[in-house]
Image (tube, rainbow, N blue to C red):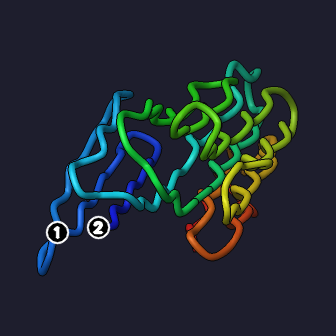
Amino acid sequence: GKSLAVSLTAMIAEFKIATGAHAVRQTYNADGTFNVPAGVDTITVEAWGGGGGGGGNAGKNQGTGGGGGGAYSSSVLTRVSGSYGVVVGQGGASDTAGTSSTFDTNVVVAPGGQPGTAGSNGAGGSGGTGGTGDVTYNGGDGATGADNPNGYGGGGGSSAGTASNGTTATDGIGATAP
């Protein structure tokens, strides 16, 4: 049979179909249903959770914490057929966790990052952890904010990569993904 690669990211889901010498790619930016094409019996699913929002509503001169990055999960699924539900994780607003990206409800799950906290020297949010799949990596943690003078809001942690955990932010600049 043919193989198919499915990628779910925060805001984008890509389905890559290998058919002979060329590949077909379909991109999604919302939740939906994946229908297995005729002749495909194995798929690779990759998913990234949404990043957590930064801390909000801080008092004057207070640095809030950055949000944690989304986790990564992937699996090779065999003997597939029919239709599967797809949920694309979304980034969190202020004080809100990112949501999980999922394939077939709980077969592949990439959790979202936690939000940063508001207030004096607000703590950074934790990266998404506890994914479900053959391969899982955690998102990076957000940085703690620094109060004035010369203060800043904490940078966001990076999403996890396909081969390693996300990068933890260390100051007011978001971390770079691996």
Q: Residues within 10 Å of mark 2 (few under 14, many from 20)?
A: some
Which x, y percent locates residue 101?
54, 39
Assess whether mark 1 and mark 2 are in contact (beta carbons under 8 angstroms).
yes
From the top left corner, tell me how far across and down residue 85 is, in percent: 44, 30
Image location (x, y in percent) of residue 127: 74, 49
- Residue found at x 36% / y 33%: 83
The residue lying toward the viewer, choosing from 121 and 113, is 113
Q: Which residue is mark 2?
A: 2
Res. 1 visible in picture: yes
Whichever of labels 2 and 1 marks the residue nearer the N terminus, that label is 2
User: Which residue is nearer to you in this view: 55 or 136?
Assistant: 136
In the picture provided, is 14 more to the left or to the right than 94? left
Q: Please provide percent x and percent y for residue 63.
A: 75, 38
Please say if 176 is above or below 46: below
The kind of residue tagged 1 is Thr
Badge 1 density bin: few <14, some 14–19, many ≥20, Cα 10 Å? few
* Amino acid of disc 2: Lys
The image quadrant where one finds the C terminus is bottom right
Residue that mark 1 sits on: 19
